[in-house]
Image (cartoon, grey):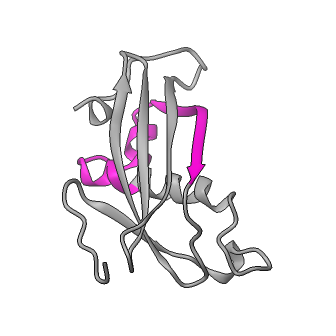
């Protein structure tokens, strides 16, 4: 499926850099942590507030869980399209789901989630900002 077009919510694209690969030129599993973070940051920006603005308001988002399932390899110089969506939320935490696809053929290469808890600068749990609950 060359030139696959992804329908639905906006996606964030990353190109696999050489430093993110192993000796087989396949993206290292640890690269997905940074890719999920980058996609989450851009997802928030698209919703109208930057991560920096959220933190400046005193809402700190702590990752309390990270899950990633690897389905297909991605290689050096591949473009990975990452879609982010709210999977579940409460008043004080949100679970975001991620779907990563190789852009050149549309194959799902990884799926995962992060659970973020909102705390204040004092470390106490706080209500999630609206940008994460709409």
Q: Is residue 29 left or right of residue 127?
A: right
Work out whether residue 20 or residue 1 is closer to the camera in this orientation and state it.
Answer: 1
Residue 35 sits above or below residue 104 on the image: above
* Residue situated furthest front in the rendering: 1
Q: Is residue 59 magenta?
A: yes
Residue 16 appears in which quarter of the rendering? bottom right
* Count of number-bearing discs: 0
Work out whether residue 64 or residue 121 is closer to the camera in this orientation and state it.
Answer: 64
Residue 75 appears in which quarter of the rendering? bottom right
Q: Is residue 131 left or right of residue 51?
A: left
Residue extent of the magenta highlight: 42-70
Residue placed at 31% from the left, 83% from the top?
2
Q: Is residue 69 magenta?
A: yes
Could you tell me residue 72's position as x and y percent?
A: 55, 64
Could you tell me residue 121's position as x and y percent?
A: 56, 26
Residue placed at 58% from the left, 46% from the top?
68
Residue placed at 22% from the left, 54% from the top?
9
Could you tell me residue 7's position as x and y percent?
A: 19, 61
Residue placed at 36% from the left, 23% from the top?
89
Residue 26 sits above or below residue 108 on the image: below
Q: Which quarter of the image is occupied by the C terminus? A: top left
Q: Is residue 21 left or right of residue 49?
A: right
Could you tell me residue 1's position as x and y percent?
A: 31, 78
């Amino acid at each position: 499926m060359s030139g696959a077009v992804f329908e639905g919510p906006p996606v964030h694209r990353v190109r696999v850099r050489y430093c993110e690969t192993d000796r087989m030129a396949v993206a290292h599993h640890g690269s997905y942590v940074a890719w999920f973070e980058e996609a989450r940051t851009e997802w928030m920006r698209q919703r109208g507030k930057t991560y920096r603005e959220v933190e400046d308001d005193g809402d700190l988002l702590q990752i309390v869980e990270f899950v990633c399932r690897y389905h297909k390899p991605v290689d050096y110089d591949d473009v990975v399209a990452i879609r982010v969506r709210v999977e579940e939320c409460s008043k004080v935490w949100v679970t975001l789901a991620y779907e990563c696809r190789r852009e050149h053929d549309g194959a799902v290469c990884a799926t995962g989630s992060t659970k973020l808890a909102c705390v204040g600068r004092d470390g106490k749990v706080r209500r999630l900002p609206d940008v994460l609950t709409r």
